[in-house]
Amino acid sequence: MPRTMEEFVHPGAVRPSPGFPDAPEHWSTALAEELAAEMGIALTDEHWEVIRTLQGAYRDEAEPPLRRLHEALEGRFADQGGMKYLYVIFKGGPIARGCRLAGLTPPAGAIDTSFGSEA
């Protein structure tokens, strides 16, 4: 039985995960946790904040350039050490892996295996 008018009007529709208002329609925290386990990442509050930040950047622009994502993450995590810190918690690249966990397509140039990034 539907609990809200939205559930009545759109039965079976995918709902945004609580705390992730900018998440893509197909995305869920369970999916992110499953992908993280495959990548060998134990998600922490910082990982979830990276996911929120990236999803917010994609809300403002369908395909934001790599530089804009870099600046968004650098600014949000400046107190912890910026991108240097994020490369510690996201081995293989915070933007490439963060986008994958956030249900987003990484921008061109985010995956550079010569620099240690991986999808």
Image (tube, rainbow, N blue to C red):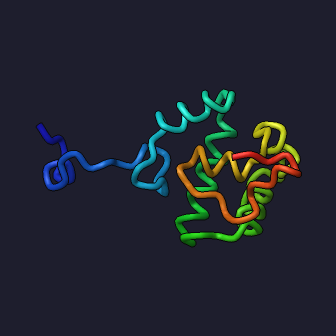
Q: Residue furthest left?
A: 1
- Quadrant of the rendering where the N terminus is positioned: top left
Vertical relation: 106 (above or below) 17: below
Is 32 positioned to the left or the right of 68 in the image? left
x and y, in percent, of residue 13 in the image:
26, 50
> Is 88 or 74 nearer to us in this picture?
88
**Total numbered badges shown on the rendered structure:** 0
6 or 14: nearer the viewer: 14
Please tell me which residue is depicted at 14% across the width and 41% down the height of the picture: 2
Along the line of sight, the residue nearer the viewer: 116 or 71: 116
Residue 75 in the image: state x and y as whole percent. Answer: 78, 59
Say above or below: 90 vs 15: above
Tell me residue 48's x, y (percent).
61, 41
Answer with left or right where residue 76 lies relative to residue 87: left
How far across and down, in percent of the image, does residue 58 sit? 57, 64
- Residue displayed at 69% across by 70% down: 65
Q: Is residue 69 above or below residue 7?
A: below
Question: In the figure, is residue 98 to the left or right of 13?
Answer: right
* Residue at the extreme front of the image, as rendered: 114
Residue drawn at the location 64% of the way across and 70% of the way down:
64
Residue plotted at (72% across, 53% down) = 95
